[in-house]
Structure formats: C-alpha cells, structure tokens
Image (spheres, rainbow, N blue to C red):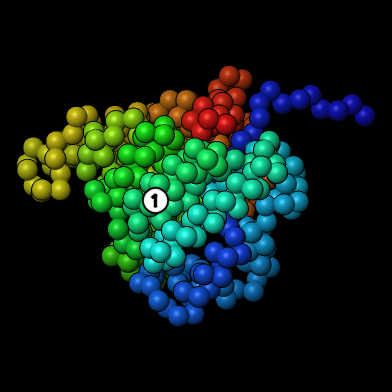
C-alpha cells in the first residue's frame, strides 16, 4: 500500500477551547451560590452542569484534556496544530482578585503543556478585564516570558464592554506587543439577554453572534482604532455577522455622525468598514460553509480569513474535508489553513 502524498499545507486550527479542572470547579461554585448577575452563564453552564447526556459528558472531558485524547482527535481529523483559548467565559465571571489569580495560574499551566508539545499547540493568554492594569501586565508577562501569542477576551465582562476607556490599558499593551486580541463570544449581556433566553437563542445559534458583533461595533464607533491604529482584533464565526452588514453600517454611521445624535458617537478617521478591513481578522470557527467563507474572503481579502474548528464544541471530521475542498488556489488554501495564522500569531 502506498502512503498518500503529503499535504501542501499544515492545518492550523485557531479557536480551540480548553479548560482547567480548577476553572470548572469555580464555575460550579457560582452555579451553586448564584453569586453573579449573568443569566447567560446560568443558562449555558447550568445546562452543561446538570446534563448527564453522553454529549455533555464528552464535551466536559474533551475540553479539559490537553493530552493523548486531544492529540489523537487532532490526528483523526488531520489538525497539525491547535491555537488554544481558555473556554468562554474564561475568568471574566469572577471577582477581580479571583479572576486575576486564576488567569495567571491558567496561563502558566497552558505554557507548560505547550512546552511539552511545541509542534502541536500554541495558545492565547487569558486575562481578567475586571482589573485592567493587572490584565495588561499579565498580557505582557504571557507574551514576553511565556511565549503566548495574544489574548482572548470573551466579549462582555459582567455587562461591561471594552470600548469603556477604563479597559484601554489592555489595548495599549496588545498594540505595543504587536499581538492580537481575540474577541471570543459570550452569551448576551444581562442588559439584553431576556428575549434570547425563552427560545434558547442565547448561545451558538445566534446570541453569541449578536453579542460579539455588537461588541466589535462598539469598539469601532467609540474610536478605539483611531486611538490604537495598529491594534489587531480577531473575530471568530466569520466576523459574527458584521461582514454582511458592511454597506449599511457605513451608510448609517455617516448619518448618525452628521446628525450629532449622541455624545457616544464621534467622527472617525475612517469608515467603519475600513477598520473591519484593516484592523480585523476572521476565523471560520463553527462556520465551515463555502458561501459565507467565500463572501468574507472576497470582502476582506484572502490574507484576513483563516481556519478554526472550535474544538471540542464543533468537533466534526467531515467539516475538515469540506474545507479542503473549498474553491481556492493552492496558494490561497495554504494561506487559509497555515500561513495567515503563522503570520498573525507569529507561530
Ligand atoms: Ca469557540
């Protein structure tokens, strides 16, 4: 039997979830004590916690495994490397002191695993935006001392968004270190979740995108990218719907600025779509669907769209095959699976 020819590209998956048992124990404590105001957290993690279905048990095991099981899953689907992100909502649901300490210990544990498997894993730092200056310091430590490749923030932090200037030390650090900020979904903030919950629309089906797309748009219209012009932000799920809205966002934003309608909207140096093309990158997590991928590649450029699986939440071997069959040139396919991620995350 002859061996198949080697692939012309590495497959790097760029939004892959993991968790420590310690983090899960802290989640369980919140579920038991009902100590935070976050209906989305109770809805999603309460369901996972109670559910004894094989699927829930399997997810719990897989998300906490960075050893043989994950590596063999990667081998089974042909994933050469995973970029690891602490699962949503990360440490953002805890008080500032707990969250800051957990972020540090989590980043240390992640680094130890990456050092055991440097060709298979890279990772983003977890930080606690609840303590913005400590978060900026932890990002610096994670990049300079641990070799992590950027930072993941799971959208709102207890109802607060990063366009609030009190968080901007984090952006200053990311820009100075030249590493990306991955704005990963969270369930909608307490202020807007009610109509999602009663129809189970709060998570991956739609709520994640509504929440995270809103967050990205808040960053743009608040002027974050005029203040930090070299800041790089990554969105999963092909941009959380925003690429589809580009034309209307630009058109309406110009009108809002002209009308002086709100203190919250100031003139920007560029159109909103310019920032989405120049400061943002897009991964395909959970969206392995040719029409959407081709659309975003056409709008944003082949150098801004890269592969992600969203393991273990969307661990589907057939999706990798579908991505191999995308209508791309050999050069574009290598960018999509490999070199865009290598360039952006400095792998
Ligand atoms: Ca994810």
**Along the line of sight, which residue is nearer the eye, 28 or 136?**
136
Residue lying at 64% horizontally and 34% vertically, measured from the top left: 11
Image quadrant assignment for residue 300: top left
**Along the line of sight, which residue is nearer the eye, 205 or 263?**
263
- Residue 172, how many percent across, how many down? 32, 39
Image quadrant assignment for residue 131: bottom left
**Along the line of sight, which residue is nearer the eye, 71 or 21?**
21
Residue lying at 68% horizontally and 23% vertically, measured from the top left: 8
Q: Residue furthest right?
A: 1
Image quarter of the C terminus:
top right
Mark 1 sits on what residue?
A: 135
- Residue 87, how many percent across, how many down? 53, 56
**Along the line of sight, which residue is nearer the eye, 229 or 277?**
229
Q: Residue furthest bottom?
A: 33
Image mark count: 1
| Horizontal relation, residue 166 to residue 125: left or right | left
Q: Give the structural element (helix, strand or loop) at label 1.
A: helix
Cβ of mark 1 under 8 Å from ligand 1: the answer is no
| Horizontal relation, residue 5 to residue 243: left or right | right
Q: Is residue 227 above or below residue 195?
A: above
Image quarter of the N terminus:
top right
- Residue 152, how many percent across, how many down? 46, 47
Q: Is residue 249 visible?
A: no
Q: Is residue 7 visible?
A: yes
Residue lying at 45% horizontally and 72% vertically, measured from the top left: 42
- Residue 127, how many percent across, how many down? 44, 52
Q: Residues within 10 Å of mark 1 (few under 14, many from 20)?
A: many
| Horizontal relation, residue 216 to residue 24: left or right | left
Residue lying at 47% horizontally and 25% vertically, measured from the top left: 303
């Amino acid at each position: 039997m002859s061996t198949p020819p080697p692939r012309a590209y590495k497959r790097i998956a760029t939004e892959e979830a993991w968790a420590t048992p310690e983090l899960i124990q802290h989640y369980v404590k919140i579920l038991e004590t009902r100590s935070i105001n976050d209906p989305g957290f109770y809805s999603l993690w309460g369901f996972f916690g109670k559910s004894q279905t094989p699927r829930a048990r399997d997810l719990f095991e897989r998300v906490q495994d960075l050893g043989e099981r994950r590596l063999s899953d990667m081998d089974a689907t042909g994933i050469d490397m995973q970029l690891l992100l602490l699962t949503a909502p990360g440490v953002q649901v805890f008080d500032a002191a707990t969250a800051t300490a957990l972020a540090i210990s989590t980043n240390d544990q992640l680094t130890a695993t990456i050092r055991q498997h440097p060709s298979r894993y890279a990772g983003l730092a977890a930080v606690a935006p609840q303590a913005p200056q400590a978060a900026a310091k932890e990002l610096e430590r994670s990049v300079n001392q641990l070799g992590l490749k950027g930072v993941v923030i799971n959208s709102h932090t207890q109802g607060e968004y990063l366009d609030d200037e009190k968080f901007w030390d984090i952006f200053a650090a990311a820009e100075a270190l030249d590493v990306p900020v991955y704005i990963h979904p969270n369930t909608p903030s307490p202020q807007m979740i009610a109509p999602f919950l009663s129809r189970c629309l709060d998570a991956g089906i739609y709520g994640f995108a509504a929440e995270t797309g809103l967050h990205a748009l808040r960053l743009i219209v608040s002027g974050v990218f005029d203040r930090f012009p070299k800041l790089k932000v990554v969105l999963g799920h092909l941009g959380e719907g925003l690429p589809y809205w580009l034309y209307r966002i630009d058109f309406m934003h110009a009108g809002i600025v002209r009308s002086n309608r709100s203190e919250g909207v100031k003139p920007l140096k560029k159109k909103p779509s310019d920032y989405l093309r120049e400061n943002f990158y897009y991964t395909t997590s959970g969206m392995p669907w040719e029409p959407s991928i081709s659309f975003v590649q056409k709008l944003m450029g082949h150098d801004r769209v890269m592969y992600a699986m969203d393991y273990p939440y969307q661990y589907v071997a057939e999706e990798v095959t579908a991505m191999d069959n995308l209508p791309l040139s050999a050069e574009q396919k290598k960018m999509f699976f490999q070199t865009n991620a290598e360039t952006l995350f400095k792998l």
